[in-house]
Image: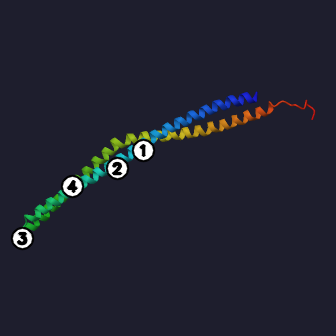
Amino acid sequence: MGFLSGAYGKLMAGRLVRQLQWQLTSVNSRLNRITKQVGDMEKSMQRQERMQSMFMNNQFNQIRMGMMSGMDQSSTQDYSAYMWGVQNLQSQMMMQQTMMSEYFDMEREAQLEPLKAIQEELETEKDNLESRLKLAQGQYEAKKKEEQDGAKNMVPDYTGGQG
């Protein structure tokens, strides 16, 4: 009886192991895709933010150079106006940079957070499947041993009970 119970149990545990392995492969595949999407999106946003910052700095420098070219170098009044204009320009620049930073933070939250939530769910599912797979593999090994032990007990005794 141990042989049949072990054989059937091994068959069912083996089936469960293969099913869990397939599910784990599927989850790993989806997790890898999501992880790549998150990384690509983060890189893209960083690149956009750097480009925007470079554009704003270039714009600031062009305006400042334009202000400097229209100034009479010997005039303190022109120099004072230039300095006031640069300070005003810097203030506006800082406000724009703050607004740009807030915009990119909102974009990250809106676009990345849903992907990160999916990524976290998949990681949890992966951990769950790995745990279940270890248990199923242990059960498979136990049933395999039960089957082998049952097969040993089925060997006929050719000695006729005389030993």
Give the vertical position of 50 relative to 158 (above or below): below
27 left or right, relative to 39: right
Question: Where in the figure is residue 110, as x and y percent of width and height?
Answer: 33, 41
Q: Depth check: 22 or 162 in front?
A: 162
**Label 2 is placed on what type of residue?**
Lys
Quadrant (top left, top right, bottom left, bottom right) of the N terminus: top right
Instruction: Classify mark 4: helix, strand or loop.
Output: helix
Q: Are marks 2 and 1 in contact (CB under 8 Å)?
A: no
The residue indicated by pointer 1 is 35
In space, the residues marked 2 and 1 are separated at their CA atoms by: 12 Å
**Label 3 is placed on what type of residue?**
Ser
In space, the residues marked 3 and 4 are separated at their CA atoms by: 29 Å
Q: Residues within 10 Å of mark 1 (few under 14, many from 20)?
A: some
The residue shown at (62%, 36%) is 136
How many marks the image carries: the answer is 4
158 left or right, relative to 100: right
Instruction: Classify mark 2: helix, strand or loop.
Output: helix
Instruction: Classify mark 1: helix, strand or loop.
Output: helix
**Label 4 is placed on what type of residue?**
Met
Query: Which marked residue is nearer to the observer: mark 1 or mark 3?
Result: 1
User: What label does residue 43 carry, if any?
Assistant: 2
Q: Earlier in the sequence, mark 2 or mark 1?
A: 1
Q: Residues within 10 Å of mark 3 (few under 14, many from 20)?
A: few
Q: Are marks 4 and 1 in contact (CB under 8 Å)?
A: no
Quadrant (top left, top right, bottom left, bottom right) of the C terminus: top right
In space, the residues marked 1 and 3 are separated at their CA atoms by: 60 Å
The residue indicated by pointer 3 is 75
The residue indicated by pointer 4 is 56
